[in-house]
Image (tube, grey):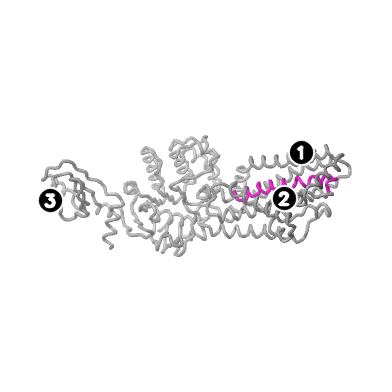
Amino acid sequence: MNVFLQELRTQRKSTLIWTLSLAAFGSLYILFFGAIKNDIQVFEDVLKNFPPVAQAALGFVLGALRTVTGFYAFAFNYVVLCGAVQAANLGVGAIGREIGGSTADFLLTKPVARWNILAQKALAVLALLVSTNVVVLAVTLPAAAAQGPDFDVAQFVALSATLFFVQVVFAALGLLYGIVARKIKSVVAVSLPGVFAFFVVGMLGSIIGEDTIRYFTPFKWFDTAYILKNSAYETTFCLLAVAVAVAAVAASFVALAKKDVQAL
Amino acid sequence: MNVIEIHNLTKSYGKARGIIDVSFDVEEGEIFGFIGPNGAGKSTTIRTLLSLIRPTSGSATIFGKDCVAEAPAIAREIGYLPSEVFYYDKMKVIDLLRYSASFYGKDCTKRIKELAEYMDLDLKRRIDDLSYGNRKKVGIVQGLLHEPKLIILDEPTGGLDPLMQQKFFELLRQENAKGATILLSSHVLDEVQRLCSRVAIIKEGRIIKLEKMSDLTRDNYKKVSVECDATADARFVIDGVSSVERKDGTVTFLFKGDVNVMVRRLAEVQVKNLWIEEPTLEEIFLHYYQKEA
């Protein structure tokens, strides 16, 4: 329990900043909808003139822009991107920070098993991600609901929840990387390029219209257009997300148990 | 009873050498010295005992428990001070020590206060504001606050001023008197000589000597350098003299035996300058190495 609480304490401030930034960005964009909703036709016409490649790359779902959730879906791509960086930071940092900063010498010579430390750290990361998602939803949902009477709550929640799913996947992958990497000097220097690489892969997939690429980037596992249409997720990709997250966490336990913690 | 038993412990890192076939025991209540130059394998051995590193082969037990399988249970009774201490920079000293204490499930508040006062450590400062020496003090308090039965020190005195070193050694003697067993690794022979009852010498990953301190000091070598007339050199080449070197009018050699004999010899010549020193550990090593070859 002490490792769990310590991790919460360490990440408290950065989680607060990330959470407020995501909530502010999301809700400001939603308020922007309120300002232009009467002229949305003009807005759509402008976007239609964009080359199809640009449309695909930016992630607009044309035709869905008339509802607040559809309009938000565009900005939400970037909320998820930022959220993925936050999650990767938490994941990579959980153990990677201890090994990279040599505080592992302190932590791993305490009378607590390695699996126990990892379990407490992983739960702390999960708790921080849950709190981020609760706050972001608590701020954006009322903002969106205020935009008109025809607001579809289920659809909005279904879309918003994908932030959490993508974050969990990146946190799990980060957790594993933080253990198997030799020594991580800077967590951001690892998480930022890693997350952006996956994002760019997704963007390229959209541009060339190649569906197979969707399997290789968590950013495309929860397709916005599909969610807007069905208020649900595609089963295959849900299973894939669960499988990757579970496998990464399981591999983390194995890797940490075998890890040699070297002196500087 | 043996607190630590190490059986043929080996750790290899691909091509790089780790430790090879290391075996020794540490008895309950003794202060055991573990000496060798940097990179000889002291830290690798200690980190394996602490289960920070998994052995390639061989095994070790502490308090009769396997040091890999039962690491958490063993850790409860161990206090560890590494050569370089690293803590969470943004924490205050007191918070770090409380966090450390929280792992042992007992109230260590009083003990933290006592130790901090003794070591002259300010508990309210942030870790990243501390000097190297003060961080080391945090390490000392951190390693001793739960009153461990086995204290493992890996080159502990770096960064401590001589006064603090003395206080620290006094603290170790007190803990030892209360029953704690101590494993002290060092490359400072003097430090080991003052404290330890037995020593193991490690070189290039292998234990090359394991003996009582009293025996080691009995056949201790003196390093003698004499600045004198070149013709007088021959007078010093008596029994027990080895590694003779001449350079810039100074003759340097290792001497093992009755110091009085050497002093009489020295008195017979016109000496311009004279140094009699403890040989460095490296010089003793060199000697053992040559003897083995």
Q: Is residue A87 above or below residue B208?
A: above
Q: Mark 3 lies on which chain?
A: B
Provide the major secondary structure of the magenta segment.
Answer: helix
- Looking at the picture, tell me which residue is in the foreground, B278 or A5: B278
Is residue B147 covered in magenta? no
Question: Callout 1 environment at 10 Å: few (<14), some (14 to 19), or many (20+)?
Answer: some
| SS assignment at label 3 | helix
Say which amino acid is labelled 2. Answer: Phe
User: Which residues fall within the magenta stretch?
Assistant: A64-93
Question: Callout 2 environment at 10 Å: few (<14), some (14 to 19), or many (20+)?
Answer: many
| SS assignment at label 2 | helix
Percent x, y of residue B175: 41, 46
| Residue B5 shows up from this direction | no
Say which amino acid is labelled 1. Answer: Leu
Residue under label 1: A28
Give residue A164's mark. Answer: 2
Q: Which chain carries label 2?
A: A
Percent x, y of residue B57: 45, 65
Q: Which chain carries label 1?
A: A
